[in-house]
Amino acid sequence: MTENTSRLLPILSLILAMLLWASSFVALKLAFRGYHPMQVIFGRMLIASLCFLPFVPSFFKLIWRKQDLKYLLTMAICEPCLYFLFEAKALQLTSASQAGMITAILPLLVAILAWGWLKEQIGRQTLVGFFLAIVGACWLSLASESSSEAPNPLLGNLCEFLAMACAAGYTVSLKRLSKNYPPLFLTAVQAFIGSLFFFPFLLLPDIGFPERWQTSSAMAVIYLGTLITFGAYGCYNYGISRLPASQVASYVNLIPVFGVILSMLILGEKLNQAQWLACGLVFCGVWISNRSEKQLVQPIT
């Protein structure tokens, strides 16, 4: 297999993962119309866990490293646990298109975290781009207008930003782990731990278990558990196991593009003129950071 061919499959996997993740914002909105957010998140984790059951026997053959336990726990706590708590709240308060746009900040958050945690170099140009992207995200939120789909976009976008901070911690941890464990196993760990983490929420009196079947919302949950939690995370974890984390993080910039398009086509959402300008500022900041001579995040060994 040539070098170009060996890179093509992980690149295509990442593009597919970004398209699926962009669609997850729309699917979550549809699911939340019929079920409580915690019911939705647990449902998708449970469905994904069931998809992984046939692979469990092969997982017992893996060689475990005790020193990797902290990275496994960090990965799972960051995502899906805290990540989905923040994202679920975000999509209750803001639109799917705005939430998708906030994801453009993820590559820069990965760079900041790698600088603070892994002591990697971060250039002045990256910091300038990070500042512009943050300003753009704040402008996007402040220019938002309340609606039935976005009752409190300012707080919702803040929650989505916190979700991206968790995703950054997940990405750095995952890159550490991908050297010693297959992508399928790491994705399964997320699903199993996520199911255990979100199940107690269903025991709360104001949440409980779903009382009736609502077709559109239920199909959205099934879609989230199979094509997103099982499929998209599998594609993403495969990509990051084959490519440097900096290159992988840059593909996240496709999510806002896909997200806005899908939100407009399926949910009928629209952005006003100020929000389009704010989106441009976010992309400008990301572009400036990616033009840095050094990679945002070097391959972790």
Image (tube, rainbow, N blue to C red):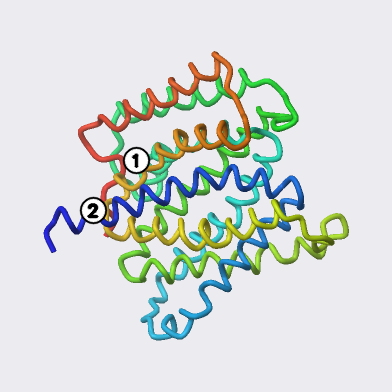
Q: What amino acid does circle 1 point to?
A: Ser
204 and 72: which one is in front?
204
Quickly name the residue at label 2.
8
Q: What amino acid does circle 2 point to?
A: Leu
Please state, as top left, top right, bottom left or bottom right, where the C terminus lies in the image.
bottom left
Where is residue 166 drawn, in percent x and y?
52, 48
Q: Residue at x 40, y 49 (%)?
A: 117
166 relative to 172 in the view: left or right: right
Q: Quadrant of residue 90?
A: top right
Identify the disc placed on residue 47: none
Please state, as top left, top right, bottom left or bottom right, where the N terminus lies in the image.
bottom left
Identify the secondary structure beneath mark 2. Answer: helix
Q: Residue at x 63, y 47 (%)?
A: 28
Q: Residue at x 36, y 81 (%)?
A: 63
145, above or below 228, in the image = above
Where is residue 17 drawn, in percent x and y?
42, 51
Q: Residues within 10 Å of mark 1 (few under 14, many from 20)?
A: some
24 relative to 242 in the view: left or right: right
256, above or below 30, in the image = above
Identify the disc placed on residue 250: 1
